Image: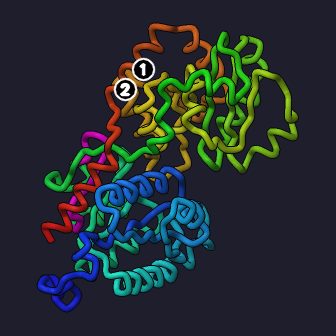
Amino acid sequence: MKDKSNMKDATQKHPLQGAGGARIIISGGGTGGHIFPAISIANALKNIDPNTEILFVGANGRMEMDKVPAAGYKIIGLDIQGIQRGSIVKNLMFPVKLANSVRKAIKIIKDFKPDAAVGVGGYASGPLLYAASLKGIPYLIQEQNSYAGITNKWLGKHAKKICVAFDGMEKFFPADKIIKTGNPIRKDAVNIAGKHMQALELYHLSAFKKTILITGGSLGARTLNNSIMNGIDKLLAADVQVIWQTGKFYYKSIIEKLGESYHPDLQIREFLTRMDLAYAAADIIISRAGAGTIAELCAIKKPVILVPSPNVAEDHQTKNALALVHENAAVFVADRDAEAKLVDRALELLEDRDLQKKLSNNIGKMAMPNADEVIAKELIQIISNN
């Protein structure tokens, strides 16, 4: 039985209810794959009701502490980390940090008085949603991957709804709580219609050559970068244009090796500020297999080669990628094989028009472009029912 002293008096109106607004906490982050969907959900809630009050809770030192304020929302950080694989010393403080984060999350809930909470994954999501359960605050989980992590599986027992992007998630969560919504995407990033020529102009590329986009996310992907570094001359010799997003960890070393202007058909970028134009320029895309990235790739409907990162919990990127491969919607190259095979596979795909068409059609069928709106409406319904 819930402790009624921890729950709001149902007869007492919230200060914002007269204006039609609710108070909602969105927790999680750590990577762009968690942060951008979270911001999309917040924007959808604001579109439905501009009076909605939204507070983000993230992890100190992670990128959400910069990205969320830049999007116009307030965020509070928890001093929380994940389990560090292969390092006993780094894990010694984990129990202390977890306990302190739960205590701080309880205080945040007490001060903010939310009507509901949302967890999008990432270090801060667990303590905040656990605190919400202790205080009788209903919450929704947005599970982005095809394989749920331990924390979300445990939190799912008390969630009101669990919004998923892949089929077969009943093996992780109670089936009656699951709603297949897809993953929220950056609408501006996938709005590529009619932008091909503008994209080519931005990157100083030719309309008469094929273009490959390589993207390893904001931090970058070592395997993708090594694979392209080893095969860049082969790509350029095949008269292929390349937009290569290296990520901030690798950009400097790559520029030091190749120089600023290695070849006119090679455009090297640390980060892609206009993702829509990068997508619009590409004939094929080489990418990691984060859930948020896959959602965007489904929306833009272009042929893609997925190279899942093996360095993530439960190897969920491989499972994400295989979900597309099983629908003949993507080409799969294992991380361990990429340096030897990726460039050749990309050149083969560029020459195979029939396969490109099949991949484009099939990946487009998997798109769920309005996930943010669906999740926002589910959250509002949870508040109404509560």
Question: What's the residue at 39%, 66% (across, down)?
Answer: 26
Give the left or right position of residue 214, taking residue 313 as reference.
Answer: right
Q: Are marks 2 and 1 in contact (CB under 8 Å)?
A: yes
Label 2, label 1: how many angstroms apart (C-alpha)? 6 Å
User: Which label number is shown at residue 318?
Assistant: none
Q: Quadrant of residue 235?
A: top right
Say whether residue 165 is magenta: yes
Q: Position of residue 42 (x, y in %)?
A: 39, 59
Magenta region: 158-169
Which residue position holds label 1? Answer: 360
Q: Is residue 211 visible?
A: yes
Q: Position of residue 378 (x, y in %)?
A: 22, 56
Question: What's the residue at 44%, 42% (across, down)?
Answer: 187
Q: Position of residue 328 (x, y in %)?
A: 38, 21
* Amino acid marked by disc 1: Ser
Question: What's the residue at 33%, 31% (across, down)?
Answer: 366
Say whether residue 280 is magenta: no
Q: Is residue 73 above or below residue 262?
A: below
Q: Is residue 341 visible?
A: no
Name the foreground residue: 17 vs 68: 17
Q: Quadrant of residue 199?
A: top right
User: Which label number is shown at residue 364?
Assistant: 2
* Amino acid marked by disc 2: Gly
Neighbourhood count class around disc 1 (C-alpha, 10 Å): few under 14, some 14–19, many 20 upward = many
Name the foreground residue: 146 vs 297: 297
Q: How is the image coloured?
A: rainbow
Q: Position of residue 253 (x, y in %)?
A: 82, 44
Give the left or right position of residue 105, taking residue 288 as reference.
Answer: left
Secondary structure beneath label 1: helix
Image quadrant for the C terminus? bottom left
